[in-house]
Image (cartoon, grey):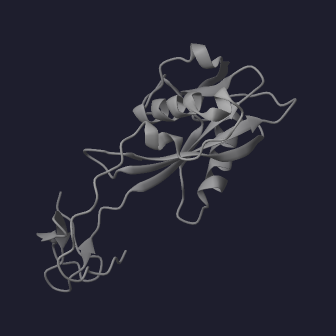
């Protein structure tokens, strides 16, 4: 797909920068950087299991997933996690510690940086499906259904393997044990062009 410079409107041309093929304006040097999107998800615990929602939207229509969604540019990820889970399951949840940060590679779209938290349904609250869910339900950790996204499976695996589940201690960055780290960026050759939006 052809893109155009946001400054002057000229067609962008491919150029190698830091070992990557990127689109650059031949007139003013504007670079179209391919930055990841950020999403937040929550493993919501109850006294008897984990809350999942069955998606009413694509991708993954009809499949189960964690409450969550994309983070807006003016949001703190933890605050976005609160907003998304309350939208998805329509009840108050207390957010716990960070469970993990992971990278979700995409072939035809921007990659995603996923941030996962632990959360707990407030005592006495009941759940119901928000507008993006067909239904919500609580599942025992040993009877979880197949989930829509590999990243959600990685988060659930990290949660189930965490010391908090096995010995009562919180685990930070558990997803790093499930998702291999991305390779380091290539060595820079000269100054990096400014990242303008």
Q: How many marks?
A: 0
Q: At 34% across and 76% down in the image, what residue appears? A: 195
Which quadrant, please, contains the C terminus?
A: bottom left
Q: Residue furthest front?
A: 167
Q: Residue furthest top?
A: 143
Q: At 67% across and 49% down in the image, what residue appears? A: 83
What is the x, y in percent for residue 139? 64, 18
Q: Nearer the viewer, residue 81 or 176?
A: 176
| In-image side of 189 versus 112 (left or right) | left
Residue 84 picture quarter: top right
Q: Nearer the viewer, residue 11 or 161?
A: 161
Which quadrant, please, contains the N terminus?
A: bottom left
Q: Residue furthest bottom?
A: 28
| In-image side of 180 versus 188 (left or right) | right
What is the x, y in percent for residue 82? 68, 48
What is the x, y in percent for residue 28? 20, 86
Up-down: is 143 above or below 136? above
What is the x, y in percent for residue 162? 59, 33
* Residue 193 visible to the viewer: yes
Residue 130 picture quarter: top right
Q: At 43% across and 29% down in the image, what residue appears? A: 60
Q: Residue furthest right?
A: 124
Q: At 59% across and 15% down in the image, what residue appears? A: 142
* Residue 130 visible to the viewer: no
Q: Nearer the viewer, residue 2 or 44?
A: 44
Residue 27 picture quarter: bottom left
């Amino acid at each position: 797909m052809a893109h155009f410079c946001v400054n002057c409107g000229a067609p962008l041309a491919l150029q190698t920068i830091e070992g990557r093929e990127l689109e650059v304006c031949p007139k003013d040097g504007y670079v179209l950087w391919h930055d990841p999107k950020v999403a937040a998800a929550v493993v919501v615990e109850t006294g008897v299991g984990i809350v999942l929602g069955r998606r009413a939207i694509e991708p993954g229509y009809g499949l189960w997933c964690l409450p969550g969604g994309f983070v807006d540019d003016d949001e703190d990820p933890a605050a976005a996690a609160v907003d998304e889970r309350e939208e998805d399951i329509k009840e108050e949840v207390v957010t716990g510690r960070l469970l993990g940060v992971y990278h979700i590679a995409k072939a035809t779209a921007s990659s995603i940086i996923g941030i996962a938290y632990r959360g707990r349904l407030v005592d006495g609250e009941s759940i119901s499906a928000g507008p993006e869910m067909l239904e919500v339900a609580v599942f025992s950790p040993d009877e979880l259904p197949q989930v829509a996204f590999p990243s959600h499976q990685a988060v659930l695996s990290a949660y189930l393997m965490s010391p908090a589940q096995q010995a009562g201690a919180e685990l930070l960055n558990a997803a790093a044990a499930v998702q291999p780290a991305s390779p380091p960026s290539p060595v820079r050759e000269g100054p990096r062009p400014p990242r303008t939006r």
